[in-house]
Image (cartoon, helix red, strand yellow):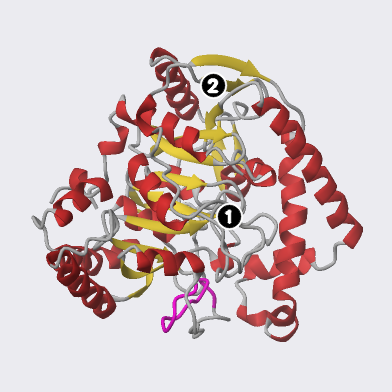
Amino acid sequence: MTDKNLTISQIAALLRKKKLSPVELARELLHRIERLQPKLNAFITVTADLALRQAREAEREIVRGEYRGPLHGIPVNLKDLFYTRGIRTTAGSKILRNFVPAQDAAVVERLSAAGAILLGKTNLHEFAYGATSINPHFGSVRNPWDLTRVSGGSSGGSAAAVAAGLSLASLGTDTGGSIRIPASACGIVGLKPTRGRVPLHGVVPLSFSLDHAGPLCRSVEDTAILMTAIAGRDPRDPDSFGARGERFSRILRKGLRGLKVGVPKQYFFERLQPEVRRAVLEAIAKVKESGAEIREVSFQGAGKAGDVANQITVAEAVAFHWRWLRTRPQDYGADLRSRMERGAESLVVTYLHAQEARKAFSAGFDEVMKTVDILAVPTLPVTAPRIDEDEVPVGRNRENVRLALLRLVRPINLTGLPAISVPCGFSSERLPIGLQLIGRRRDEATVLRAAWAYEQCTPWHEQFPSV
């Protein structure tokens, strides 16, 4: 197997036709994990015995003609924020280092029912509250394109593992960009669905009104396959919606012709590294060349969205962590503890005003989306920063790493709209660059359609790191 063949769509066909054994596949990926984990630090827990047991069961079922679908026998991993029955779920923290749930998260139940094989739980920024996956308790995740650089966060271990071919897909969470940031930094596909499309029951929360869950994959088609398995209402999550088993690939191959693609005048193209700007503008030109209509759009309030999102996130994070902040403050990493201690001093009125500002910003964004089918913008203004740097160069200036990584993705969490990051090129240092496509509410199918069409006319999705 080569890296180009390590996609769900290609491997599933081999498994279904009995040309590849799920056990053989699982052993190959477990061998890769054993070899590359010391370099990448992508995993917190590797579930080798479970994976081989599940692979043998999948093989028996497939041989008996009991094929469950395209995830049957497919090895995946999970960000260590999703409850897994009998397997510790640390949230990348010292506080939950030994927490072993008695039940699976809703999405884990669905992956299990689809026949997926669990290789392990991946490393992340502590309690998912950060954008780099620099973790004081389990060590930093390293970017497989350059081991001196961050993988992005907070789902950094998931993205690094998928990019390096340690698993075929992963599930992550996205409160302020935590799927799209590492997807862009590691050169893979990451989808933040519409809020509520994927249920959050059994997921350690960061910010209960901004949290999303979604897939990180090696192709857009694989992303659609994962979404069909995990999306849909769960009665244990009152915010969840949608039918189970929806085919998110139903219009995948319709192409770009006829789609109206908005390119914002303001905010999203300000303060970009030159190579990022060039790659994204070339991607938009390719979208136009493929038949889409490009429209310039304008909206207000994005510049204040970061502050609004921060006020909401820190208030809701403090509410969840309140007991531990009072009884175990020393068990938090210094950056996380100081951020939440400052947040604990904020007023309730600040939080309520932020929620009102969020509603207004979201309503304005929806008005813009009535004029186009999707927006096309950069995922990140920069390529992956070095692990040892606090500031990153942007033009002639420098910007705080965390703020730079959040700047172009966090506003979309306020809206709850679906957004995907797909690879759109590389810097001169061979660091990946991501194109972010933002869709209308509940219209993941069109987002995936546009992303797949762009992917098919470019080579970036076929390029993987040599670790």
As displayed, is residue 245 above or below residue 347? above
Q: Position of residue 45 (x, y in %)?
A: 37, 75
As displayed, is residue 286 above or below residue 111? above
Write down the residue under mark 2. Answer: 261
Viewer-proximal residue among 203 and 268: 203
Label 2: element kind = strand
Which region of the structure is painted magenta? 83-93
Q: Position of residue 430 (x, y in %)?
A: 33, 37
Q: Residue at x 25, y 37 (%)?
A: 462
Q: Residues within 10 Å of mark 2 (few under 14, many from 20)?
A: many
Q: Is residue 423 left or right of residue 204?
A: left
Q: Residue at x 36, y 49 (%)?
A: 225
Label 1: element kind = loop
Q: Is residue 248 left or right of residue 329?
A: left
Majority SS type along the magenta span: loop
Q: Residues within 10 Å of mark 1 (few under 14, many from 20)?
A: many
Viewer-proximal residue among 95 and 319: 319
Write down the residue under mark 1. Answer: 212
Q: Is residue 26 visible?
A: yes
- Say which amino acid is labelled 1: His
Q: Position of residue 2 (x, y in %)?
A: 15, 48
Q: Position of residue 113 (x, y in %)?
A: 36, 67
